[in-house]
Amino acid sequence: MTRKRVIAILAFAAILTLGAVAFERALRERFVGPEHSDRLADPPRFLTEYLAITKGRETLAKDGFNTNVWTLVPDSRSLSPDGRADTYFVRRPADPNSGTFTVQDPNGSRRLVHVELKGDRITSCVVRPK
């Protein structure tokens, strides 16, 4: 291959990579709200459903959602690490300290609230389903 052809291929690959990064960032900005993070003074052994929903409802309020209008949608697909069935919170199988719950407004619009506990830090964000 000639030197010009190699340079052209590398430039094209760089443009594709930058385009993919920009596209991913645009999708994230459109569908994922800001991440809220707090440090817990006395972190629990694992993320309880109660803590996840409490933190998630705070996040909804911070993002401008009326928490009296957006109601929890039952989803009992997961168990907490102590074996109790979760009623609303769906844990990631690979990490039981991370998961989502769904809220719905009277018009049927839904939002997912992602909550994660890592050590003494709890983070959450609101996600608009595609």
Image (cartoon, rainbow, N blue to C red):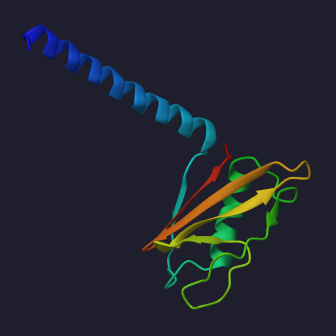
Residue 76: x %, y % from top left: 71, 76
Where residue 82 sits, quadrant-wise, is bottom right
Residue 5 found in image quarter: top left
Locate residue 75, reporting x and y percent: 74, 71
Q: Residue furthest left?
A: 2
Quarter residue 16 falls in: top left
Q: In which quadrant will I find the C terminus?
A: top right
Residue shown at 62%/41% (left/top)? 31
Residue 63's place in the image compared with 101, above or below, is above
Left or right: 122 in relation to 4: right
Whether 114 is drawn above or below 120: the answer is above
Q: Residue furthest right?
A: 106
The residue under the point 42% across, 74% down is 119
- In the picture, measured across the screen, residue 95 lies left or right of residue 36, that is left
Q: For the N terminus, give its image quadrant.
A: top left
Expressed as whole percent of the image width and height from the top left, the position of residue 104 reads 82, 56
Q: Residue at x 24, y 17 (%)?
A: 11
Measuring 77% from the left and 52% from the top, which residue is drawn there? 110
* Residue lying at the far front of the rendered structure: 1
Position above or below: 2 against 63: above
Q: How many marks?
A: 0
Left or right: residue 101 versus residue 119 is right
